[in-house]
Image: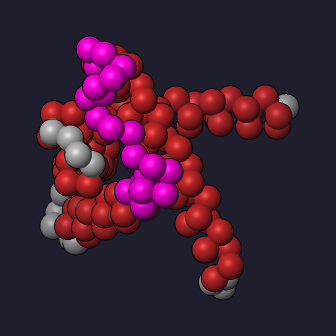
Amino acid sequence: MFDPLAFVLGVSVGATIGGIVLRAACWCYNAITSESKDKPAVPEPGFVKAMLIAFFSAVTVIAVQVAIAFVGGAGTGFSPKSAMLLTCLPPVSGVVVMSILLAQLLPTSSGNAVGIAFTMLGMGFALSLILFVLVRVLAG
């Protein structure tokens, strides 16, 4: 059964975490690539703008990945090798879509947007690994 309160709460928490990760990715990217602190490579967005960018990026990435899944699973007779290749596409499509959205929504170049997208991907993997370890340790 669909619970609207849980849905709104989940979207709010997800957008908040996404906004924090986006701001942290901008900070890390600027720390690595900027020549001076006075002129960052990518201006760090405000918290609400970062949350909105993260929300719209997630919605767009999910829509693209669902479209890829429908195309791949539409009874086109993929072999197991093709199906394995299809499972590798979501991270690639996620980085591409995220880069395009970041280039449009942040005052930055396409190259910097790709760098931030990869930084966010790395931070997402790191957070997932940390949460996995915490759950395994706490579960006993």
Q: Total label count? A: 0
Provide the major secondary structure of the magenta segment.
loop
Picture coordinates of residue 110, whole percent (x, y)? 14, 40
- Residue visible at 65% across and 36% down? 131
Which residue is at the front of the view, 58 or 83?
A: 58
Q: Where, quadrant-wise, is the N terminus in this rendering?
A: bottom right
Percent position (x, y) of residue 17? 56, 49
Tell me the quadrant of the picture where the C terminus can be found. top right
- Assess whether residue 51 is covered by the magenta stretch: yes
Question: Residue 76: which quarter of the image?
Answer: bottom left
Q: Position of residue 24 (x, y in %)?
A: 47, 34
Residue 54, quarter of the rendered image = bottom left
Q: Residue at x 63, y 82 (%)?
A: 4
- Is 73 left or right of 58, judged from the image as shown? left
Between 50 and 99, which is closer to the camera in this rendering? 50
Determine if residue 38 is in view. yes
The foreground one among 34 and 54 is 34
x 33%, y 38%: residue: 43
Q: Find residue 3 and report its image quarter.
A: bottom right
Residue at x 28%, y 25% (from the top left corner): 39
Residue 39 forms part of the magenta stretch? yes
Q: Is residue 127 above or below residue 47?
A: above
Q: Which residue is outermost to the front?
A: 38
Residue 85 shows in the view: no
Magenta segment boundaries in residue numbering: 34-54
Rendered location of residue 40, percent (x, y): 30, 27
Instruction: Describe the colour scheme in one phrase.
Output: secondary structure
Is 132 located above or below residue 83 in the figure?
A: above
